[in-house]
Image (cartoon, rainbow, N blue to C red):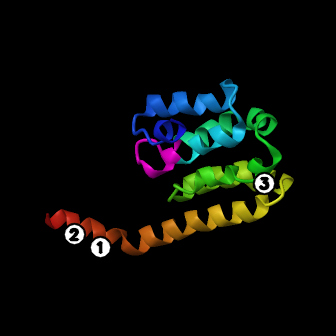
Amino acid sequence: MIRALSASREPKVVQAALDLILQSGLDGRQTFRILFGPLANPETKRLPFEFVRANYEELIGRLPDDIRAFLPGVGTAFCDADSRKEFVALFEQSSNKFVGGPRNYRQALETIRLCEERRAAQGADVAAYFARQ
């Protein structure tokens, strides 16, 4: 059920699912998965980051120690400089507090930068292709 909720393309459903992470009696190891399903959908990919940013301290208090280091993963769907700056502002320092956090932060940041570079390198060709269609 958790996987199905996180796979929704409907922003209202995703937001309700994200709220389960904080409001339910479920184990954080189970509900944590909800953060990553929405990243695959353009309609919902930003919601997990916004949720973490708005609820960071509460999440840190609720999630088990071994899960906290994975929070930077919510930025891996970003592909632009402005979003990257928001990601860095939230996680650059805070990821250092958890075992594995710095590595997960660097990997997520690399994913964002590679997407930006790919977009810059291929963007004009993709736009030209669709303009011909």
- Residue under the point 44% across and 33% down: 11
Amino acid bearing label 2: Tyr
Q: Secondary structure at mark 1?
A: helix
Callout in the foreground (3, 2): 3
CA gap, disc 3 and disc 1: 37 Å
Rounded to the nearest angstrom, the CA distance separating label 3 from label 2 is 40 Å
Query: At 71% across and 60% down in the image, what residue appears?
Result: 105
Residue pointed to by mark 2 = 129
Left/right placement of residue 89 relative to residue 20 reads right
Point out the image quarter for the C terminus. Answer: bottom left
Q: Are marks 1 and 2 in contact (CB under 8 Å)?
A: yes
Q: Which residue does the numbered mark 3 point to in the structure image?
A: 95
Relative side of 47 to 73, left or right: left
Q: Which contiguous range is marked in magenta?
A: 37-46
Tag 2 secondary structure: helix
Secondary structure of the residue carrying numbered label 3: helix
What type is the residue that disc 3 sits on? Ser
User: Residue at image x 82%, y 47%?
Assistant: 65
Q: Which mark is residue 125?
A: 1
Q: Position of residue 20 (x, y in %)?
A: 61, 29
